[in-house]
Amino acid sequence: MSRTVLITGATGTVSTALQTALEGADVDLRALVREESRADGPRRQGAEVFVGDLDDARSLPPAFEGVHDVWLLTPNGPRAPENNMNVMWAARQAGVERVVRLSVVGAAHDAPNRSGRLHALSDQETERCGMRWTVLRPHWFMQNLLNEAGDIAATGTFALNMASARIGMIDVRDIAECAARVLLDHPDRHHGETYTLTGPRSLTFDEVAGRLSHALGRSVTYLPVSDDAKRKTLLGHGVPAWIVDMLEEYAQAYVSGWGDFTTGTVAGLLGRPPRDIADFVRDHAAAFADVAR
């Protein structure tokens, strides 16, 4: 019998990739979206769509009725533990069997950033939920580089406050495929596991620029900037102050060497190596292409 999987955060980067990874699998997909206007994407991917807001626990029960497995992704923000709690409450009330939660790299009560500490609270709640559970803690997303695509296309440069940090960055498609693997395996197989997911090697952004240059056939340069300069840019683009603070805290941690590691977890789950930065750049070269050409 097919299992029913509810995807929360259904229009986000990882959840969208997860729906792609589950295409053709013997599961009945449901997607939770905050607004009906966001329903078209999940519907095109074959999901039954429910509208509900993780800020509002009373809006959630209909989406959870008859669900076996929940993919739990909460928005970044100070209310993340509350959002997680609301999902766990609805899941328990509906008799959900398993929760697979997307956390963050290095989540811990003593993490060097508030996001990691908030996620640690939700991870702990998940571990004590009484249902089968698995937690995924992915490293820095290669897809974050797409935020710099406009500058790269226009000027051949991109600016980050990461100095010479080395980061074991990972392609979101690998995160999604690991999540799909967990969801498609027997609920007992990954119960109680916390998986830290990384790419195959730690990279500096100078190395990323070199790979972009090779793929695009033109020079791309990484420009290290100060925290204040990056903050001014992000705020100027309308990024909320809490998110700007979060990104700055992560950048400071990465500059200290906090992100310079990799694991073999992706290969262990998927039976193949994780995608390299060369794979990511090749597959997304059009996004970075020179707009003048």
Image (spheres, helix red, strand yellow):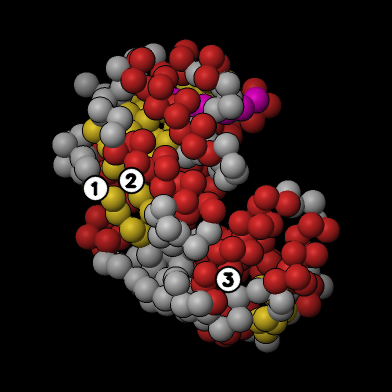
Given contact means CB atoms under 8 Å apart, are the residues at marks 3 and 1 in contact? no
The span from disc 2 to disc 1 (Cα, nearest Å) is 6 Å
Question: Whole-percent x and y of residue 141?
Answer: 50, 61
Pointer 2: what residue?
135
Q: CA distance from mark 2 to mark 3?
A: 25 Å
User: From the viewer's perspective, is residue 85 above or below residue 281?
Assistant: above
Question: What amino acid does circle 2 point to?
Answer: Val
157 vs 57: above or below: below
Residue 93 located left or right of residue 114: left
Residue 252 shows which numbered tag?
Answer: 3
Residue 92 x/y as whole percent: 34, 20
Q: Position of residue 4 (x, y in %)?
A: 34, 24
Q: CB of mark 2 within 8 Å of CB of mark 1?
A: yes
| Residue on which disc 1 sits | 193
Between discs 3 and 1, the one toward the N terminus: 1
Name the quarter where the N terminus is drawn: top left
Q: From which residue to which does the magenta span run? A: 30-35
Instruction: Name the side, left or right, on which 14 lies relative to 201.
Output: right
Residue 26 appears at what percent x and percent y?
29, 31
Q: Disc 3 residue type?
A: Gln
Local packing at callout 2 (Cα closer than 10 Å; few below 14, some 14-19, many 20+) is many
Q: Amino acid at mark 1?
A: Glu
For the point 79% across and 57% down, the residue is: 235
Helix, strand or loop under label 2 = strand
Label 3 packing within 10 angstroms: few (<14), some (14-19), many (20+): some
Which secondary structure type mostly characterizes the magenta part of the structure? strand
From the image, state whether disc 3 or disc 1 is nearer to you: 3
Circle nearer the N terminus (2, 3): 2
- SS category of the residue bearing label 3: helix
Give the spatial CA distance, label 3 vs label 1: 29 Å
Q: Is residue 292 above or below residue 35?
A: below
